Image (cartoon, rainbow, N blue to C red):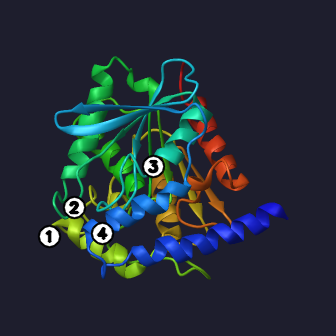
Amino acid sequence: MQQTILQAALRTTMQALVKPVLTPAIPVSLQRTLIRQAYRASIPPRRTAFSSGSIKGIPYQQVTCNPNGRRAILYLHGGAYIIGSSETHRGITGHIAKATGCALFVPDYRLAPEHPYPAAVDDALLMYQHLLALDYSPEDISVVGDSAGGGLAIALALRLKAEQLPLPSSLVVMSPWVDLTHQQLHVPDAEPVLQVRWIKNAATLYSNGMPLSEPMISPVYGDLSGLPPLLIQVGSQEILLNDAKRLAEKAKVDGVKVTLTEHAKLWHVFQIHAGVLAEATHAINALARHIEEHSPS
């Protein structure tokens, strides 16, 4: 009963504080400022440690919480390629660090419209190569992303495959944005977070005139064969539900080991409420199990 009340309160909060910010009517610079404030409610666990680094001008945060062993997660934050940062995602990355015992590396990849495609993919690749240079083996690296970061995680895997570079041991995507053409958006009974006109505007800003069906922009159109085991988590109350389902089906057809988990009556990247909302904490724990299952060490 208490969790039901909490879930309703969080949904109302998202509708009141986050969704109104995500509109093309507000300048991107102001969206970034406002979303930083909204994400202050997502709090990392106690004893989470954050340290800063930089690789070739791209800053990143390293996040740990009771690290166990030598494994790493490359975490790619969401925000439709125009907002978001390692700072906004301190809560969710802290909880992932606690659940997995891994060190998370969270790059502040360049954002559109100042830096459209392929800047984000280039920076994700740079960060992955940096982890290899730090002597993390590919088998001990997982790539995790939410929303646009989920799409970026799949695009990174496609880029690694195309360049014949070693792939990570596993992939996890939460509410992935993998079709920027938006041809098959879901129409939920409620959508507490996203606005269609906002993601369509963001897609235009990010693509920089490239076809929106380009697989490195919309990875659901790519050849996913050979990709590592993939976990997809999505809420039933979000317009990107079909993106997750289509990605799962495409991965299955292409021979990828894939698990899709749909969380009833939950919203876009509900995992940011881990530590407070039980279902979000359970989802993070499932993420940790997926990574552990496919890590050799």
Helix, strand or loop for disc 1:
loop
Q: Residues within 10 Å of mark 1 (few under 14, many from 20)?
A: few
> Which residue lies under the disc numbered 1?
209
Counting residues from the start of the chain, the first of labels 4 and 1 encountered is: 4
Is disc 4 surrounded by few (<14), some (14 to 19) or many (20+) residues within 10 Å?
few
**Callout in the foreground (4, 1):** 4
Horizontally, is 96 left or right of 10 in the view? Answer: left
Q: Are dots 1 and 3 in contact, CB under 8 Å?
A: no
Crowdedness near tag 2: few (<14), some (14–19) or many (≥20) residues, C-alpha within 10 Å: many
Quote the CA–CA distance across marks 1 and 3. Answer: 29 Å
The residue at which mark 3 appears reads as 89
Determine the image quadrant of residue 128. top left
Query: Which residue is tagged 2?
Result: 112
Quickly name the residue at label 4.
30
The residue closer to the viewer here, 59 or 197, is 59
Name the front one of labels 1 and 2. Answer: 2
Residue at (37, 60) in percent of width and height: 79
Mark 3 belongs to which amino acid?
His
